Image (spheres, grey):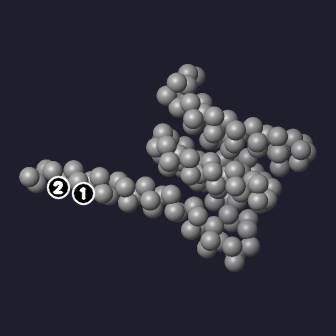
Amino acid sequence: PLCETNTAFEIASELAINSFNQDLSSFGSLQYIGDSSPLSEAANALKQLLCSSPALFSSPAALSALENAWKAPYDSKRIDVEEREMLCSGLCAVLISFPPDQWTASVDNLARPVIACLNIVSKEADQIMGKGNE
C-alpha cells in the first residue's frame, strides 16, 4: 500500500469511507473548494485507497462498509455520475482481488442498485412519454 503500515492504511481507509458518508449525508450544504466538491474529493480518496490495496478490503466489516457506501448514493440520489464512477472503479478493483468463484455474487451485488435505479428512471420516462401523448 501507499501508506507505511497496515494500521495507517486502515485508518486512512476508515477516514475516507466516513468522509464519503458524511459528505453524502450533508450534500447540498457543503462548501465547494475550487472546482470539486468535498464529496468528489472523498470519492476520489476512497477510489485511490481501494485501487492501491484492494485485498485489504476483503474483511466482512470492510465489505459491509463498502456495500453501504455503494448503495447510499442510489438511495439518496444525491451523487453525480462522476463520483459513482470513481467509487465503482475502486469497488471493481476490490472485486477482482477475490477468487473467481466469488465474482458472480459480487458483481450481482454491485449491479443490483444500478438496475433498480434504471427501472425507476425507465418508469418515470414512460410516465412522461405517456403524458406527452395525451
How many numbered discs? 2
In this rendering, the answer to whether 44 lies above or below 29 is below
The extreme bottom residue here reads: 101
In this rendering, the answer to whether 44 lies above or below 95 is above
Inspect the image, locate mark 2, and give the three-letter code of the amino acid beneath it: Gly
Q: CA distance from mark 2 to mark 1?
A: 6 Å
On the picture, is 18 further left or further right than 118? Answer: right
Q: Are marks 2 and 1 in contact (CB under 8 Å)?
A: yes
Residue 124 spot, x, y in % from top left: 29, 52
- Disc 1 secondary structure class: helix
Query: What residue would you read off at disc 2?
Result: 130
Query: What residue would you read off at disc 1?
Result: 126
Q: Residue at x 49, y 43 (%)?
A: 76
Q: Residue at x 63, y 67 (%)?
A: 106
Residue 121 spot, x, y in % from top left: 35, 54
Q: Along the line of sight, which residue is nearer the eye, 2 or 123?
A: 123
The extreme left residue here reads: 134
